[in-house]
Image (spheres, rainbow, N blue to C red):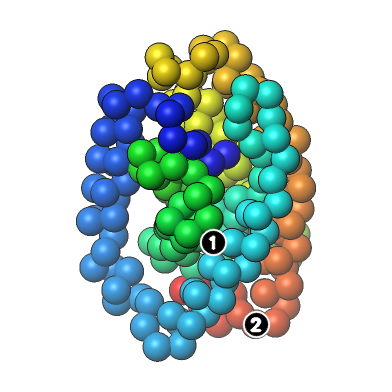
Amino acid sequence: MHIPDGFLDPTWIIATYAVTLGYLALTWRRASELIKGDRAITVSIFAAGIFVAQMLNWPLPGGTSLHFVGGALAGIVFGPVVGFYVMFIVLAVQTLVFHDGGLTTFGANVLNMAIIDVLAGYYAYRLVVGIAGNSRRSRLLGSFLGGWLGIVLAGLAAGVEIGLSPSFPYGVTVSVPVMVSWHALLGIIEGLATAFIVDYLYGKGGLAAWGGRL
């Protein structure tokens, strides 16, 4: 999922950075109001947990890899704004310290995993809970669907970005099917893990106390 340097052409680099920086600017004030005191500690611990989970990688044909993301989980637990910053912190540390993902492609990686995945997971969960009611069954279904859909859409976005870049040796006819099919399979595990963690946190009173998010 992390796109390395050399895979995107300048047009995609500029476009994805513009979207990411624009989203960062739009959400900064709201995030600064929400992430204070003990909440900042909770966000940091949660980001560390997602960071560890993302370190498990499986290589895919075409030069990219498959791994857990956690964006939907962050969105469901903290809401779309704080969830974005949880993932932004994770991706920034991975890029700057561990060289997991490139500097030129950082905007694309944040767009895919911190914006698309977080928003898709959050709204899928809220839609299911809003329609079916806030029962344990609907929360399990909503968080599973959010985890699955978030990672699939993030994989789709990555496949489109690299497939349409002339510097990448394969086109979208290769990159998109590979990314979507493999992430659809991993999405089952991601969805189950998301549902299990959300259910656990709700059982402990965490999500109930936050109203489903920070």
Q: What residue is at 60 percent from the left and 50 percent from the top?
A: 69
- Provide the secondary structure element on which disc 1 rests: helix
Residue 4 visible here? yes
Name the residue nearer the viewer: 98 or 66: 98
**In this rendering, position of residue 175 left or right of residue 191:** left
Residue 120 visible here? no
From the viewer's perspective, is the residue at label 1 or at label 2 nearer? 1
Res. 202 image quadrant: bottom right
Residue placed under numbered mark 2 in the picture: 205
**Other-residue count near label 1 (Cα within 10 Å), few / some / many at <14 / 14–19 / ≥20:** many
* Dot 1 amino acid type: Ala
- Provide the secondary structure element on which disc 2 rests: loop
Name the residue nearer the viewer: 73 or 61: 61
Name the residue nearer the viewer: 192 or 141: 192
- Locate residue 6, reporting x and y percent: 43, 29
- Locate residue 170, reporting x and y percent: 54, 13
Q: In which quarter of the image is the N terminus?
A: top right
* Dot 2 amino acid type: Gly
Q: What residue is at 49 percent from the left and 74 percent from the top?
A: 43
**Other-residue count near label 2 (Cα within 10 Å), few / some / many at <14 / 14–19 / ≥20:** few
- Locate residue 38, reporting x and y percent: 46, 88
Q: What residue is at 52 percent from the left and 79 percent from the top?
A: 42
Residue placed under numbered mark 1 in the picture: 74
Q: What residue is at 26 percent from the left and 33 percent from the top?
A: 14
